[in-house]
Amino acid sequence: MPRFNTVVFDCDSTLSTIEGIDELAAGHREEIARLTDAAMRGEVALEAVYGRRLALVRPGRDQLTALGRRYVETLVPDAAETLRALAAEGVEVRVLSGGLLPAVLAVARACGVPDHRVAAVDVRFDATGAYAGFDEGSPLARSGGKLAVLRAWGADMPRPAMLVGDGATDLEGRPAVDCFVAYAGVVARDAVVQGADAVVRTPSLAPVLALALGDDAPADPARRALWERGRAGLDAGRSPVHP
């Protein structure tokens, strides 16, 4: 694989081991988990469940602040180190998520990604901080939204570009990038794995550094150690790259 100049990461079940909407679910956890899984498997359109889930949960400002902390507490092993190593090696790192922007920004910041390279669904609050709706015009609240955002980024996104994610909404973005990596270290979805150019099966994001840099080993000792650990993880995963 070539050396990549941009790597775009999903958030839920990719940078973090959790699904944010499930964490917010409280008494509606079973129903929301079912809706989320169906959308991530591509069995139903995202727009068919997005607003319904938020109407059940109605997350206020304090809840989303707590979710941001929870995202950071449950980062996938080597997530922050991998994203920071990519940036240090001159690779542009972005986060593209159908999650809620206030919480997604928290995990992106923890991984060293600037706010202007994060795309997620914004929410509105009233004067008391209670939930007052979401950005219904966001492409990320519907199927095909990640593809639309990636295409809108267009020439601003240095090529070749890699997309890393776990769900059907991530796979939909494949036509707009040069490589789609299915991250199966948290949850493996058959259709996503089968549609990917490469698969990372380890419970670590270090293999993404190895895939992104190829044979271009970092000179910095700490980053090189992470790159080597990532290469070992790819070997352990057995045939991570599909023909």
Image (cartoon, rainbow, N blue to C red):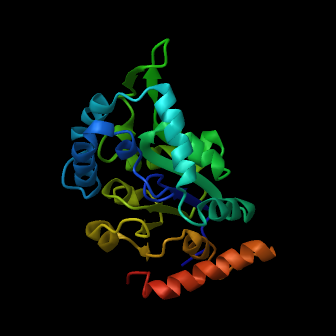
Quadrant the N terminus occupies: bottom right
Position of 224 with respect to 125 (left or right) is right
Between residues 90 and 219, which one lies in front from this camera angle?
A: 219
**Residue 58, image x, y percentages:** 35, 27
Look at the image and tell me whether residue 118 can be seen.
no
Quadrant the C terminus occupies: bottom left
As drawn, 124 above or below 240: above
Between residues 151 and 228, which one lies in front from this camera angle?
A: 228
**Residue 141, image x, y percentages:** 34, 38
Residue under the point 21% across and 39% down: 48
Residue under the point 74% across and 62% down: 88
Q: As drawn, which residue projects farthest toward the top? A: 127
Q: As drawn, which residue projects farthest toward the front? A: 27
Between residues 154 and 188, which one lies in front from this camera angle?
A: 188
Q: As drawn, which residue projects farthest toward the left? A: 43
Q: Quadrant of residue 21?
A: top left
Q: How many marks?
A: 0
Look at the image and tell me whether residue 156 can be seen.
yes
Q: Quadrant of residue 99?
A: top left
**Residue 168, image x, y percentages:** 31, 57
Residue under the point 66% across and 44% down: 114
Between residues 161 and 88, which one lies in front from this camera angle?
A: 88
As drawn, 202 above or below 51: below
Q: Quadrant of residue 106?
A: top right
**Residue 163, image x, y percentages:** 48, 61
Q: As drawn, which residue projects farthest toward the right? A: 220
Residue under the point 70% across and 64% down: 85
Position of 61 with respect to 48 (left or right) is right
